[in-house]
C-alpha cells in the first residue's frame, strides 16, 4: 500500500488500487489496512477500528500509522485546518514572470515549460494543461498585456493631455472661440472634477438627453398604480435607452453625473462611488446609482463605469485570462472579481473569504438586518442568518476590516445602499447596467448576490443590460445563472454591436473556458437587430474576418458623414468621433466599441419584441 501526504510516500504490501481523495493533499488506496496523517492536520476513517500507532522512522516529518481492523465506510480529510469546501482551483497569468526568450520559445517552438513560467496556479497540473491546450489564447494575453504594461504610463499621460485639450476647446467654443478668447485674454481654463469637465467618452458622443424619457416615466408610474404594465413596444426600448445612456454617463465625474441626472433626466441622483481595487491599490472602480424619483420610487438603476480609453489597467483586465474556480458556481474572470472588490490575487485566500462563504453578510450592522420580504417568518429567519454570517465573516477576516470593506469596495458599498433603497421604496425594482468592463461588473454583481443567497434582493431585480461586455466565466457559471435570470422571463440582455472586439474577449473556442450567456441582441452596421445565442465571429480570427472588419470600418466612416441627413441632426457625429473611426482602421474592433454605436443601435435598431420582466 502507498499513502501519500503531499510529498511524503509510505509503502504497504497490501496495496490494491488507488482512490484520489483530493488532488493536492491526500492519496489513498482502497482495500487499505492503514492510514497516515500529519500531526498538524487530521484524517478520519469512519466505521473502522484503529490499531496500534507506530511512528515511521524513514521520514523527516513526524508521521504516525494506524492499523485499520475493519473496512472504512466513510473517508474525510482536513489539511491545515481547511475543509474541502474552502479549497478552490485558480490560474493566474503573470506576463512579468517570464522573459522575452521564454515568450519566444513558447511562441515559436511551443515549449510548454517556457509557457508555464508565465503561470501561477493551485496545482502544477493545471498550469501544464492550460499552457498546452490554450497556448495561443495565453500567448495573446501575455503579449498584449506586456505591451500595455510597457505603454501604461504614456497612455496615462496621453489621456491626461487629450482630456484637457478637448475640454479647452469645448469650454472656449472650439478652435475659433479659443483663438478669440486668447486675443481678448478671456481663455476659460478647464477644471477637473467640475460640472463642465467632460470625459473623452463624453466628447466622442455628446448626447445627454434620454430618447423616450416621458414615455418611460409615465409607464413606471402606471405600472405601480396598476393602470398599465411596461409594454414591449415602448417600455423595453425606453429602458434600454436609459441603460445605455447611464452606461455612457458613468464615464463622467460625480458632478457631471449629478447635474445630468437631475437637470436633464429629471430623476433623483442617489450617489457616486469611487471604489477600491485592492489588487491595483487604487480607487479604480466607479459606479453611480439613481432612482426615477426621490419618494415612492419605482425604479433604481445601478451603472458601472467601463473601460476608459487611456487606462492601461482597464485594458489589461479585459485581456487577462486569469480565473478563479468558485465551487458549485464555476470559473470566473479574476480581474473582474478584483474590480468588484471580491479579492486580490496577491493573497488568493481573500477570494475564499468573499466568495466561498455561504450567505456572507460582512456588512451586518451597516446594511441593517431587516428582510426585504413582507413575511414575518422570513424576517426572523433572515435576521438569524445575518447574525450567523456576520460571526463567520468576523472570524475569517476580523471585525476591524469590515467597515473599511463596506465603505471602499464596489460590491459591498452598492449592496448596502441597494438594500437600503429597496426597503425605503417598497414598490421599486432595480436595473443593473454597464458598458465594456462596466458590463462585466453589471452581470457579476447579481451573480455574487445569488452566491451570497441574497434572494430577497434578487426578487426585486428587473433586469441586467450590458453593452459591449466581455466574457466573465465558463459554461458552468452560465448554467448556474440562467436558472436565476432566465425564468420565468429573461432578465439579462447583452447588446453587441457589429465588430466590437471586447465582447469577443477573453477569447473562446471549443475547449476554452470563457462563455457568454443571456439573451444576445446583436446589431450590424445598418443597426438591424438580431436575437442570437452568440455574436457572429466570436473570436475575431481569420483572414475573412480581418477583411470584412476593415471593409465595415470604411463603411462606418462614410456613414458618419451622412447619418445626420438620413436620420436627423441629433445623430451628427463629432469631429473627434470621425477621427476615432479613421484611426480605428488600424484595429476596427476598437472603434466599434465606442458607446456612440450602441446609442444608435438602441434608438435606430429595428423594433423587436423582447419579453421583459414586469413590475
Image (tube, helix red, strand yellow):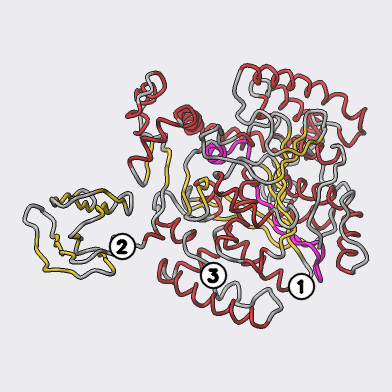
Q: Circle 3 — which element?
A: loop
Label 3 sits on residue: 363
The percent coordinates of residue 587 (x first, y second) are: 64, 24
The percent coordinates of residue 35 (x first, y second) are: 20, 60
Left or right of 67? Residue 495 is right
What range of the chain is rendered magenta? 289-318
Q: CA distance from mark 2 to mark 1?
A: 49 Å
Label 2 sits on residue: 75
Q: CA distance from mark 1 to mark 3?
A: 22 Å
Q: Residue at x 53, y 51 (%)?
A: 337
Q: Circle 1 — which element?
A: loop
Q: Quarter of the image containing the C terminus?
A: bottom right
Q: Nearer the viewer, residue 582 or 441?
A: 441
Q: Which mark is residue 426?
A: 1
Mark 1 or mark 3, which is nearer to you? 1
Q: Circle 2 — which element?
A: strand
Q: Is residue 36 visible?
A: no
Q: Nearer the viewer, residue 359 or 219?
A: 359
Amino acid at each position: 500500500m502507498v499513502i501519500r501526504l503531499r510529498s511524503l510516500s509510505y509503502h504497504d504490501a497490501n496495496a490494491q488500487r488507488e482512490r484520489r481523495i483530493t488532488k493536492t493533499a491526500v492519496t489513498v488506496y482502497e482495500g487499505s489496512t492503514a492510514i497516515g496523517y500529519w500531526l498538524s492536520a487530521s484524517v478520519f476513517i469512519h466505521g473502522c477500528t484503529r490499531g496500534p500507532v507506530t511512528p515511521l522512522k524513514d521520514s523527516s516529518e513526524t508521521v504516525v500509522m494506524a492499523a485499520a481492523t475493519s473496512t472504512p465506510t466513510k473517508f474525510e480529510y482536513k489539511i491545515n485546518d481547511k475543509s474541502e469546501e474552502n479549497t478552490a482551483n485558480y490560474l493566474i497569468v503573470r506576463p512579468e514572470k517570464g522573459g522575452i526568450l521564454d515568450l519566444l520559445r513558447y511562441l515559436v517552438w511551443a515549449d510548454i515549460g517556457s509557457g508555464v513560467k508565465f503561470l501561477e496556479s493551485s496545482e502544477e497540473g493545471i498550469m501544464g494543461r492550460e499552457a498546452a491546450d490554450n497556448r495561443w489564447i495565453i500567448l495573446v494575453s501575455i503579449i498584449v498585456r506586456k505591451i500595455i504594461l510597457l505603454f501604461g504610463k504614456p497612455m496615462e499621460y496621453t489621456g491626461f493631455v487629450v482630456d484637457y485639450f478637448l475640454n479647452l476647446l469645448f469650454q472656449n467654443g472650439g478652435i475659433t472661440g479659443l483663438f478669440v478668447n486668447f486675443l481678448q485674454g478671456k481663455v476659460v481654463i478647464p477644471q477637473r472634477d467640475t460640472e463642465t469637465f467632460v470625459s473623452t467618452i463624453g466628447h466622442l458622443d455628446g448626447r445627454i438627453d434620454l430618447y423616450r424619457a416621458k414615455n418611460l416615466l409615465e409607464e413606471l408610474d402606471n405600472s405601480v398604480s396598476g393602470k398599465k404594465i411596461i409594454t414591449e413596444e415602448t417600455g423595453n426600448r425606453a429602458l434600454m435607452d436609459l441603460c445605455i445612456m447611464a452606461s455612457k454617463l458613468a464615464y463622467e465625474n460625480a458632478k457631471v453625473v449629478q447635474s445630468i441626472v437631475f437637470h436633464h433626466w429629471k430623476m433623483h441622483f442617489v450617489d457616486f462611488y469611487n471604489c477600491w481595487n485592492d489588487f491595483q491599490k487604487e480607487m479604480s472602480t466607479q459606479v453611480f446609482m439613481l432612482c426615477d424619483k426621490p419618494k415612492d420610487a419605482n425604479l433604481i438603476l445601478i451603472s458601472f463605469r467601463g473601460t476608459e480609453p487611456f487606462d492601461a489597467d482597464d485594458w489589461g483586465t479585459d485581456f487577462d485570462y486569469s480565473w478563479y474556480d468558485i465551487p458549485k458556481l464555476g470559473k470566473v474572470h479574476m480581474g473582474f472579481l478584483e474590480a468588484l472588490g471580491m479579492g486580490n490575487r496577491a493573497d488568493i485566500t481573500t477570494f475564499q473569504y468573499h466568495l466561498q462563504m455561504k450567505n456572507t453578510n460582512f456588512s451586518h450592522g451597516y446594511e441593517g438586518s431587516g428582510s426585504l420580504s413582507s413575511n414575518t417568518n422570513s424576517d426572523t429567519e433572515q435576521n438569524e442568518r445575518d447574525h450567523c454570517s456576520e460571526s463567520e465573516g468576523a472570524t475569517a477576516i476580523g471585525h476591524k476590516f469590515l467597515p473599511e470593506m463596506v465603505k471602499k469596495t464596489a460590491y459591498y458599498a452598492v449592496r448596502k445602499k441597494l438594500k437600503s433603497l429597496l426597503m425605503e421604496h417598497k414598490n421599486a425594482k432595480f436595473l443593473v447596467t454597464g458598458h465594456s468592463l462596466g458590463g462585466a461588473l453589471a452581470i457579476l454583481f447579481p451573480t455574487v448576490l445569488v452566491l451570497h443567497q441574497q434572494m430577497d434582493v434578487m426578487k426585486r431585480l428587473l433586469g441586467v443590460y450590458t453593452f459591449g461586455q466581455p466574457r466573465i466565466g465558463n459554461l458552468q457559471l452560465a448554467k448556474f445563472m440562467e436558472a436565476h435570470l432566465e425564468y420565468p422571463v429573461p432578465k439579462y440582455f447583452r447588446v453587441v454591436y457589429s465588430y466590437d472586439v471586447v465582447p469577443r474577449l477573453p477569447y473562446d473556442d471549443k475547449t476554452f473556458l470563457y462563455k457568454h450567456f443571456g439573451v444576445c441582441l446583436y446589431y450590424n452596421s445598418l443597426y438591424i437587430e438580431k436575437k442570437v445565442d452568440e455574436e457572429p465571429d466570436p473570436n475575431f480570427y481569420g483572414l475573412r474576418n480581418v477583411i470584412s472588419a476593415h471593409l465595415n470600418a470604411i463603411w462606418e466612416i462614410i456613414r458618419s458623414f451622412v447619418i445626420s441627413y438620413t436620420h436627423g441632426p441629433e445623430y451628427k457625429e463629432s469631429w473627434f468621433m470621425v477621427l476615432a473611426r479613421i484611426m480605428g482602421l488600424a484595429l476596427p474592433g476598437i472603434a466599434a466599441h465606442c458607446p456612440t454605436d450602441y446609442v444608435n443601435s438602441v434608438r435606430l435598431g429595428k423594433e423587436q419584441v423582447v419579453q421583459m420582466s414586469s413590475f
